[in-house]
Structures are given as C-alpha cells and as structure tokens.
Image: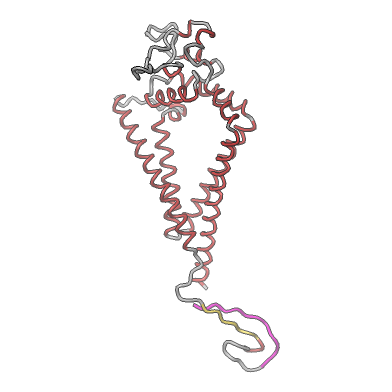
Amino acid sequence: MSNYRYQGGGVGGGGVAGGRGYSGIEVREVMHPHHFTYVSQCVKYMIFMLNFVFWLFGGLLLGIGIYAFKDKWEEANGSVRLENFYDVFLNISLVMILAGMVIFLVSFSGCLGALRENTFLLKLYSMCLLLFFLMEMAIAIICFVFPQYMNTFLEKQFTDKIIHSYRDDPDLQNFIDFAQQEFKCCGLSNSGYQDWSKNEYFNCSSPSVEKCGVPYSCCINATDISSGLVNIMCGYGVQETPVPEARKRIWTSGCIEVVRIWAEHNLYVIAGNALGIALIQLLVIYLAKTLEGQIELQKSRWSA
C-alpha cells in the first residue's frame, strides 16, 4: 500500500508522475513494504509474556483456594458461615479464590489483548491496572500519613472478629499463629494478650482447660529445643498472672502496634519496594496504552 504526501509548489504545467504534478502540486510517493506494520512486536510480546506469567500465577492461586475451600466445606459438612463481609474477608481460602479470579481475568485480558491486538481488551486491562494503582496509592497514603487512624480502625473493626473466629477456621488459626510467632506479639489491640479473654475457649469463665490462657504462639519459648516438640500448654492460665510475670512467659504487646513499629523501623525499605512496584505498574500501563495506539494507527492505515 502506498501513502501520498501533497505539498504546494509553484505554478507549472504538465504532470510528471512522482515529481512536479498538476497545477504546480508536488507529489511525493512513500512506499511501504507489504508487510509493514506500526505495531511493535517487542512491546506486544513483552506485554503478552508478562501477563502470561501472572495468568499462570492467578490460575495456581485460584486452584489452591478452591481446593482449600472444598476441603474446609467437607470437614464442616457444608456449614461454612458466609453471612457478612467479615466472614468472607477472614476466610483465607475465599480470599485466595477472589484474588486468583481477579489476577486470572485481568492478566488474561492483557494476554489475549496483546496477542490478538484487541483494543477493547487492552483498554479493559489498562483501566484495571490504573484502578489497582489508585487503590494502592490511597491505602499507602492512609497508612503512612495517618498511621494512628489506621491502627484505631483495624482495632475496632477486626479485633473482636478475628479473636472470636480463631478456633472456627483452621486456616485463620494458622495465619494468626504464624503472625504472632513472626512478630513476637499476642492479640491484636493495645490490650495485647488480654484480647484472648474475648475468645470462648480462653475466657476465664469458660469450662475449657484453656481458660484464662492464650494460644501457644504467644509463648516466648513454645518449642522445646532438645525434643523439638511444641508445648501447646505453655500459655495456660497466663491471663491470671500479673503483667511483669506474664512477660517472662509470653509476648504481651498487640500485633497491630508491633507491626506499626516494625513498619516505621523499615520505612525506607517498604517505601522503596512500594515505589518499585508502582513504577512497574505505570510502565505496564504505558506499554498497554502504547500498543493500543499503535493498533489504532495500523487500523487507520488499513482503512485509508
């Protein structure tokens, strides 16, 4: 296909193809090879490969979530409670399913949009990435600019729910135990280990053998070094002891405050990683918009 560029010139007579044209108009003919395309193959396959990796990751996350939820459903004989937002948010297998679905669908639209040069899918993909970026920026601003407000919000909204659900969901229980051991904390709010009095198994009025206790993950030395066995009774009765005595056996500070202090001490590392992720997201959005523009330009060439 040929593209012609017209440029006005002086008055002249007679036409010569490819030179001085009719009525003094200069005609320059620019020939493109028949296989010429405005679409950069480098940009196209870079977007495709990047999203293909995330598509596989989303599918893996979705599969693991479905398997975990199915296993939990069978163990509970179909009595998994899903009555409100907190029941869904605190159900780790459901969170994995939802996150996997979002990653799977968004990356699939990026994959297919780049491979098939579909502008609708590329627009959908770039809009989703932009939405994720804005949400991440909003959360980051709230966390770094208003940390005390975030602390108060998390304590009010999640402490009771998480403490109450500790023994109801094995996945949540494992996650809480991991967090308490990793960050050397106990409970969530500023009340620290006393939060566990809100759990029906650890409440001092409970008939359970664990009454007035805390989970083993709160203990400073829960694992016996010589045998390698975990002493699950190490936190029994600790709520009845004075705080100075309790500190010899367990971590007493709430996890929300401990995590906030940890984040302040590692602020530059966290900010650097967040900035790197944000720049990568912006780069991918730019590449998607660039590819979209190239496809539109190619379409206009076909319709010319």
Residue that sits furthest to the right in the current view: 10
Q: Position of residue 51 (x, y in %)?
A: 44, 50
Q: Nearer the viewer, residue 150 or 85?
A: 150
Asked if residue 261 is positioned above or below residue 117 in the image, the reply reads: above
Q: Is residue 187 above or below residue 6?
A: above
- In front of the other: 181 or 14: 181
Give the residue displayed 33% in from the left and 28% down from the top.
Answer: 72
Q: Which residues are magenta?
A: 1-12
Q: Is residue 219 left or right of residue 24?
A: left
In the rendered image, residue 141 lying in the magenta stretch gets the answer no
Residue at position x 47%, y 25% in the image: 182
Relative depth, front residue between 248 and 82: 248
Q: Note whether residue 193 is visible.
A: yes
Residue positioned 44% across, 8% down in the render: 212
> Which residue is outermost to the bottom?
14
Q: Quadrant of residue 215?
A: top left
Q: Measuring 49% from the left and 55% from the top, which residue is drawn there?
A: 122
Locate residue 52, reporting x and y percent: 41, 51
The percent coordinates of residue 217 (x first, y second) are: 43, 19
